[in-house]
Every structure is written in C-alpha cells, then in structure tokens.
Amino acid sequence: MITSSVSSASTITNLGSNFLERFGTTSGFSRMTRTNPGGGGASESTETPRYRTWFEGYGISANNGPLGLFVGDSRKTVGGIAGFGARIATGVNVGFSIDQSRTDIDVPLALQSARIDLTQFGFNASIDSGQWTWASAIVHGVGNINSRRDTGLGFATAGYNAKLDGAISELSYYWSKDQYRIVPKGALEFVRAQTAAMQEFGGLDPVSATGSTVHRFRVLVGAEVGHYWIFDKKIFDVSAYGKFVNNVMQSFSDVTVSLGTQSITFQGVGESQYGADAGASASLSLTNTARIYINYDAKFRAAMQSHQGTVGVELKW
C-alpha cells in the first residue's frame, strides 16, 4: 500500500480547510476596528482606513493515528501568506490572498515519506449589518507531490500533481459590553481535493497508482470571546474561540495500486465525523494603521491532532 499517497490527499484537503477558515471568517477584533477603530474611547463615526495588506508566517504540526490499513503519519508544514483587502462600500469588504506552503510527511512504519509544495489563491468578502456579519471565501490551490519509498533495495520515487477547490460561508453576531465581546458563529465549508495518478521509478518493484478525489462538507458552530485594553494610544487585544465540527459528508474515490498484473484497491482516510477546534490570539495595534499579532489554532479529531502557530503584521491606509 502506498500510504504516503493516502496521506498526501488528506493533507491537501486539510491545508485547504486551514486556509479557508483563517481567510474566510471574521475575527471579533477585526469587526470591532471596522466600526470603532480607536477602541472604546473613540467615536464610531471615526473614518477607518480604506485599504489593508497583511503578511503572515506559520507552522503546523499534525499527527494521524492508524486507521484500517493506514498506519498513521506525522506532518510538518511551514508557509507564508500575503494578502490585500479593501472597503468598497460602507460595511462591505473584499480581499485577495496567496498562501505558499511546504509540507513534509513521514510514514515511518511504512518506510515512506512525501513532500508537498502547495500554492493557494483565495478571495473573500464580508458584509456588516448592525451586529451581524456575513463572510465568505473561495480558494483554489495547485501543488506538486514528491514521494519516496524504501524498498530495501533502493528508493522508489514518484512525482505527481494535486489541486483543490473550497468555499466557506460564515454568519456571526457581535455582542460587546465595555471592552469585552462575545461573538457566536456558524459556518458551512466544502472542500474538494484531487491528486493525479502516479508511477514510481527506481528501487525494487516500483508500483503505479490511480489518482484520488476527496470531497468534504462540514458544519462549524462556536463562539469567540475577547477583551482589549488601551494604553499609550495603543490597543492590546486577546481572544479565544472554540468550535464544534460536524463532518456531515466525506467521500473518497477508490485508489488502485498496481504492480505488473497484480493490483489492490482501497479507499482514502478522512477525519472522524465529530471533532472540535480551539484557538487563541493576541494582537497589538501600534497605531491606527499598523498591527502585529500571533495566533494559535488547534484541531482535535478521534485519530488526529493538529497545532498551528501564526505570526503576522497588518498595515492599513
């Protein structure tokens, strides 16, 4: 079994979800600054900057336990994001972002590994109406996968392509009192990922495998809580969130691995139906037009845990 190909399809799907959920949803702090850029002591009529750009660097560590014929793996990702956004009308915001990442997958029990270089392009939009915000995003990604398998008599290697498409739509309600806030949220997310057919070269008994397709539709329901302080004309904000995740639908195409006239067919692996996401954020607005921040995001499933750390800077004008 080419375990690394199963891992790669799962990884592409999860990277698409990670980008969607960071890019296509609105944080309570961002919502507050759109309507009250100076914090609790400023007038809500204060004109906010019209444009913004942001740059982020992140790292992800994920571990997946065994499931059926899948022996489990570990995944390490590093990436960078650049984005541009604009307020095109009162309460209406749009943005474009690019995510470039590299993921190393290690499957020690199967003596296999893989590297994924993935580029994702995203477009988002949000509309504020009173305390309500509707935010949505679409993402398209293309990538290259290079796998390596120890056959005992040399390494069998393969290179093949991958792509993904995804969309998310979220509705949230912003409630605040003094410098505290609670933001209940609900979202729908769909991701479709594909990996191309592959043919190994080198080693003992190189094999071929058909391409795979993964579809996943899920519902996320949760809330964010936050508080900010104003000092020396700066705003320091901290927040935390929790979400319940229901993977309503997950489908995996059959993958056939062939060696000469022999072949075996199996399905990919996905997440457990139910799970939870949690995270925290801290940001410091140095001025009305410059902010630095750090984020932590965790995902908990029956056979998988993922931890992501992000540092970023946002500039407005």
Image (cartoon, grey):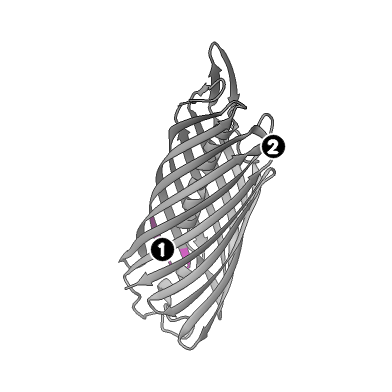
Q: Is residue 267 above or below residue 168?
A: above
Instruction: Name the magenta segment's main secondary structure.
Output: strand
Q: Residue furthest bottom?
A: 232
Residue at 46% in and 37% down? 145
Q: Which residue is mark 1?
A: 55
Residue at 53% in and 22% down? 206
* Secondary structure of the residue carrying numbered label 2: loop
Displayed quadrant of residue 81? bottom left
Magenta residue span: 124-132
* Label 2 environment density (alpha carbons within 10 Å; few <14, some 14–19, many ≥20): few
Residue 169 drawn at (x, y percent)? 46, 51
Residue 118 drawn at (x, y percent)? 43, 45
| Residue 254 seen in this snapshot | yes
| Residue 24 seen in this snapshot | no
Position of 202 compared to 54: left or right? Answer: right
Q: Which residue is mark 2?
A: 66
Q: Is residue 263 above or below residue 188?
A: above
